[in-house]
Image (cartoon, rainbow, N blue to C red):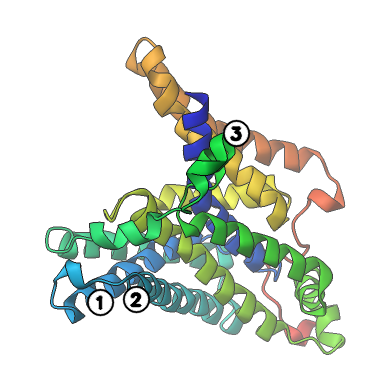
């Protein structure tokens, strides 16, 4: 049971990690994007449309489907859709200076609604099971490496892509001039502006890229984890991804471990429930990730250390005239 739980949890880490890495990059610029759950849904919608268009292009004959376009097309559509919604968020909050919290919640509602709509339109007419096989295809030599290979190397490429992107973002933020400039914008945009750093450009780029990364989480959930089925619960994972940003104290590399922990807690109910008596106890197990989220928020608020705090200008609009 333990091996099966760890194996599935490592795979499921991807949806949290994509979301939390994208949100961390966004928040480092000072944008508190509560629209991440909706952006994950909207990115997933784009991927579904992209895959559907590809299937139409080959005449609906899935036997003609090839791995490269079946993977690349939905990912590109995801980036287009999620990035466009991230740019729209910036248009409202950076250019038009709308309230970030209200804007983010509105985008979440919009993204969830659009995915539900397309599920109703395409759900009974389109199947993505064949495309899903390309996403879940693991490494050929994984079985030869015993327990390690089974647990960590037997999955589709997206979990490794999530880890690679997380490490890359962590490196850029900590070791490059671009990352330091971005963090300067998030901490004190007036000072960054005075130093010649474009506040608007950094916010737009970070939010759009962060949205694209987060959108990959929805793609993973549909095409890898669910085998091509369009779900209704991506939004919940988006909210937990935002909590993971706080749990990992705005460090994408720590987000890998945090995402794995949350994935393990989320899946725990499926492995423990058969040993419990009564539905009520199984439902209590489902609550664990959310209880942990609340505890993390409380502890982070109490421990008032700079390294555990968000960027100083997070959630605040920048008015150059007030500099």
Residue projecting furthest to the front: 144
Q: Relative to the observer, which residue lies in front, 273 or 65? A: 65
Q: Which residue is painted at 55% across and 76% down in the image?
A: 208
Residue 239 x/y as whole percent: 50, 50
**Which residue matches tag 3?**
292
Labels 2 and 3: the sequence-earlier one? 2
Residue 159 visible somewhere in the drawing: yes
Camera-side mark, 2 or 3: 2
Position in image of residue 64 (x %, y %): 20, 73
Circle number at residue 69: 2
To which quarter of the image does residue 313 belong? bottom right
Tell me how far mark 3 sits from mark 1, CA to CA: 41 Å
Between disc 1 and disc 2, the foreground one is 2
* Residue 108 makes an appearance in the image: no
**Disc 3 element:** helix
CB atoms at circles 1 and 2 under 8 Å apart? yes
Distance, label 1 to label 2, CA atoms, is 8 Å
- Which residue in the structure is indicated by mark 1? 54
Q: Earlier in the sequence, mark 3 or mark 1?
A: 1
Name the front one of labels 3 and 1.
1
Instruction: Determine which quarter of the picture holds residue 114.
Output: bottom left
N-term-proximal mark, 1 vs 2: 1
Label 1, secondary structure: give it: helix
Mark 2 and mark 3: span between their CA atoms? Answer: 40 Å
Above/below status of 44 relative to 69: above
Give how far across and how far down residue 318 sits, in percent. 71, 77
* SS of the residue under disc 2: helix
């Amino acid at each position: 049971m333990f091996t099966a739980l760890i194996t599935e949890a490592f795979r499921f880490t991807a949806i949290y990690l994509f979301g939390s890495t994208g949100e961390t990059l966004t928040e480092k610029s000072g944008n508190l994007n509560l629209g991440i759950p909706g952006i994950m849904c909207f990115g997933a919608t784009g991927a579904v449309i992209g895959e559907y268009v590809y299937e139409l292009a080959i005449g609906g004959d899935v036997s003609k489907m090839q791995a490269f376009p079946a993977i690349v097309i939905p990912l590109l559509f995801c980036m287009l859709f999620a990035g466009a919604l991230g740019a729209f968020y910036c248009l409202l909050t950076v250019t038009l200076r709308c309230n970030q919290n209200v804007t983010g919640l509105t985008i979440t509602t919009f993204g969830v609604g659009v995915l539900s709509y397309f599920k109703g339109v395409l759900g009974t007419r389109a199947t993505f099971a064949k495309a899903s096989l390309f996403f879940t295809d693991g490494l050929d030599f994984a079985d030869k490496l015993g327990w390690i290979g089974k647990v960590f190397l037997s999955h589709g490429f997206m979990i490794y892509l999530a880890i690679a992107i997380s490490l890359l973002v962590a490196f850029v933020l900590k070791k490059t001039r671009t990352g330091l400039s971005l963090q300067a914008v998030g901490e004190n945009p007036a000072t960054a502006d005075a130093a010649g750093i474009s506040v608007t450009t950094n916010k737009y780029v970070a939010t759009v890229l962060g949205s694209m990364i987060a959108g990959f989480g929805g793609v993973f959930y549909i095409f890898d984890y669910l085998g091509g089925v369009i779900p209704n619960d991506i939004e919940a994972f988006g909210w937990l991804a935002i909590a993971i940003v706080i749990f990992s104290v705005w460090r994408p590399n720590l987000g890998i471990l945090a995402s794995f922990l949350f994935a393990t807690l989320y899946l725990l109910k499926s492995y423990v429930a058969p040993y419990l008596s009564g539905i009520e106890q199984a439902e209590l197990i489902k609550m664990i990730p959310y209880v942990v989220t609340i505890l993390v928020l409380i502890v982070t608020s109490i421990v008032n250390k700079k390294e555990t705090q968000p960027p100083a200008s997070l959630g605040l609009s920048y008015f150059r005239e007030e500099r």
